[in-house]
Image (cartoon, helix red, strand yellow):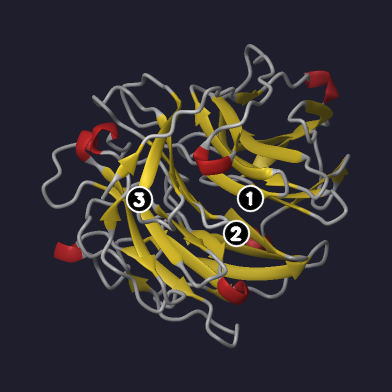
């Protein structure tokens, strides 16, 4: 395949920090509102919310059960309304994993609003990958919208899955499942690559996966990955590299030919001699596609322009002494405003706080921000926008 490298003339990162402790409300109950942000817990005591919005309907996938071998559930709601009773996503019990916060499910909305879900299989998941490898699982909502089809493993060659996988879909019936792995002959993280398995028939069948990332970047083994297919035919993938093992930089892959070829752009550098177990987010808003990631305890976002070029953004100064900021997600409303949500203080087997900051249409931070406790172990937050400009944070 042909790789093209697009290097933007200006890359300014939005490092979300500078939260004034005196401006934060210390506690919020279920359904409480702080300004235009309403906070809601995941239904049924679940964790790891993944959200997608289709018109005025929000779709939610979450995890519940033993972190090493649990289940995924799906529900939906009209904007601002209660969630419907959940249905289980995985037909084989205990076939999903939540340990480490990076290996859970991802969802995407495709043709006619069909829900597509992909996740890293647990030790109990079947069918297995080649040579009994950990499988990359995929399923979709059936035609009637009443249940999920039996999950399938889409991994045909690229074994070594560790940091989970992701899924993207568009309105034409194209679906893409992506993950990073080294393959059967991999020696370490420096030869791992991002792999994409494409479907052109709305997820009925998938072609053999092909490498999307440049071989020289490597891929951080237990960091997450995010993908997005936008309505304009673009396909984007965010991942963390592992060049030389001690360099864990964030890369954006961009494709303008629906996943056939990709260009790679480095978004940030991070010299760290180990895997930080981080996640990424890609979101399409009325103000463009936004990419979000973390580096050295700060969360960042940038707006993606035409052909993967990155637009300038404001970088507020960080505040010293704050807990590590992790697991960023982004949503945008019809006014062009953007909210970034992340966790603070979360770590291995430890929950923490959920924090947020709203930015105006020009990318400048507003006074609408906050932080509250209550993020469970292995979890993070999700967020979506309402038609009237409000935001709901699910945690």
Q: Name the mark nearer the viewer: 2 or 1.
A: 2
Query: Are the residues at dot 3 and dot 2 in contact (C-beta closer than 8 Å)?
Result: no
Q: Give the image location of residue 274, x and y in percent.
A: 32, 27
Considering every residue shown, the one lying at the far bottom of the view is 144
Q: Which residue is mark 2?
A: 231
Residue 261: image tag: 3
141 or 28, which is in the foreground? 141
Mark 1 falls on what kind of element? Answer: strand
Residue drawn at 71 percent across, 18 percent down:
18
When the figure is inspected, residue 379 is found, relative to residue 22, above or below; the finding is below
CA distance separating discs 1 and 3: 21 Å
When the figure is inspected, residue 244 is found, relative to residue 283, above or below; the finding is above
Label 1, residues with CA under 10 Å away: few <14, some 14-19, many ≥20:
some
Query: Are the residues at dot 2 and dot 1 in contact (C-beta closer than 8 Å)?
Result: yes
Query: Is 260 left, or right, of 360 in this rendering?
Result: left
Quarter-wise, where is residue 263 in the image? top left
Question: Could you tell me how many numbered marks the image carries?
Answer: 3
Evaluate whether residue 97 shows in this view: yes
383 or 361, which is in the foreground? 361
Residue drawn at 49 percent across, 75 percent down:
140
Q: Give the image location of residue 318, x and y in percent.
A: 65, 15
Q: Give the image location of residue 58, x and y in percent.
A: 70, 64
CA distance separating discs 3 and 2: 18 Å
Label 3, residues with CA under 10 Å away: few <14, some 14-19, many ≥20:
some
Mark 3 falls on what kind of element? Answer: loop
Quarter-wise, where is residue 291 in the image? top right
Q: Which residue is mark 1?
A: 284
Mark 2 falls on what kind of element? Answer: loop
CA distance separating discs 2 and 1: 9 Å
């Amino acid at each position: 395949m042909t790789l093209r490298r697009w290097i933007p003339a200006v890359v300014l990162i939005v490092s979300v920090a500078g939260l004034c402790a005196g401006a934060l409300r210390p506690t919020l109950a279920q359904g409480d509102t702080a300004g235009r942000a309403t906070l809601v817990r995941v239904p049924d005591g679940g964790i790891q919310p993944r959200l997608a919005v289709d018109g005025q309907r929000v779709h939610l996938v979450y995890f519940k059960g033993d972190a090493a071998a649990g289940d995924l559930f799906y529900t939906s709601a009209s904007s601002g309304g209660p969630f419907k009773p959940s249905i289980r996503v995985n037909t084989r019990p205990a076939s999903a994993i939540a340990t480490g916060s990076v290996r859970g499910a991802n969802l995407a909305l495709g043709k006619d609003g069909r829900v597509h879900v992909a996740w890293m299989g647990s030790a109990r998941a079947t069918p297995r990958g080649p040579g009994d490898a950990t499988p990359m699982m995929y399923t979709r909502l059936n035609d009637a919208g009443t249940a999920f089809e039996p999950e399938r493993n889409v991994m045909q060659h690229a074994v070594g899955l560790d940091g989970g996988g992701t899924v993207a879909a568009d309105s034409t019936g194209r679906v893409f499942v992506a993950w990073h792995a080294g393959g059967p002959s991999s020696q370490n993280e420096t030869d791992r690559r991002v792999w994409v398995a494409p479907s052109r028939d709305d997820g009925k069948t998938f072609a053999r996966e092909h490498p999307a990332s440049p071989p020289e970047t490597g891929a951080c083994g237990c960091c997450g990955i995010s993908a997005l297919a936008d309505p304009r035919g673009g396909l984007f993938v965010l991942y963390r590299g592992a060049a030389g093992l001690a360099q864990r930089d964030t890369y954006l892959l961009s494709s303008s030919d629906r996943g056939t070829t990709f260009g790679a752009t480095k978004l940030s550098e991070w010299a760290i001699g180990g895997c930080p177990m981080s996640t990424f987010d890609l979101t399409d808003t009325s103000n463009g596609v936004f990419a979000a990631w973390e580096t050295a305890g700060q969360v960042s976002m940038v707006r993606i322009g035409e052909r993967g070029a990155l637009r300038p953004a404001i970088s507020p100064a960080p505040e010293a002494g704050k807990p590590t900021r992790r697991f960023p997600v982004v949503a945008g409303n019809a006014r062009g405003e953007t909210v970034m949500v992340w966790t603070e203080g979360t770590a291995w087997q430890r929950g923490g706080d959920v924090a947020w900051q709203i930015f105006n249409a020009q990318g400048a931070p507003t006074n609408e921000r906050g932080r509250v406790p209550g993020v469970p172990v292995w979890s993070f937050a999700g967020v979506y926008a309402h038609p009237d400009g409000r935001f709901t944070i699910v945690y």
